[in-house]
Amino acid sequence: MKIPYEFVERTIAGEHFLVPIGEAAKTFNGLFALNELGAFLWKYIPQAENEEALIDMVLREYDVDRETAAKDVREFMEQLTTMGVVEQ
């Protein structure tokens, strides 16, 4: 998986946000809010070979069943892919 633009993750008042920087700031307006799982996944996307690797990371970190983890990871990745933030 690849993140083609530069973003930094920031925590403001306990909330997680993706902030576009560099060329990304010209393409994306505003901030992207992340929930706790989104912030966790964002940190590991560059290291993950695929969605299955992310699902395995979620299972190690959170007390959740595989079906729920897979659904949540796929929904998050689909949103990022649709917005052009991530290339799979």
Image (cartoon, rainbow, N blue to C red):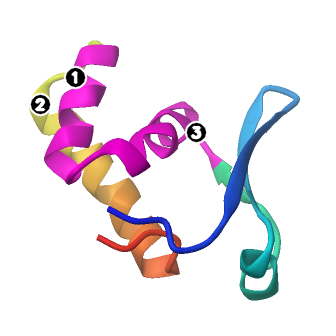
**Separation of marks 1 and 2 at Cα, in angstroms:** 7 Å
- Mark 1 = which residue? 59
Nearest-to-viewer mark from 1 and 3: 1
Q: Quadrant of the C terminus?
A: bottom left
What residue appears at the point 34 percent right and 67 percent down from the top-left corner? 78
Q: Is residue 29 magenta?
A: no
Quarter residue 9 falls in? top right
Q: Tell me where residue 15 appears, x and y as whole percent.
A: 75, 35
**Separation of marks 1 and 3 at Cα, in angstroms:** 17 Å
- Mark 2 = which residue? 66
Q: Residue furthest top?
A: 63
The magenta stretch is 34-62
Nearest-to-viewer mark from 1 and 2: 1
Circle 1: residue type: Leu
Q: Is residue 88 left or right of residue 37?
A: left
Circle 3: residue type: Asn
Mark 1 touches mark 2? (CB < 8 Å): yes
Question: Mark on residue 35?
Answer: 3
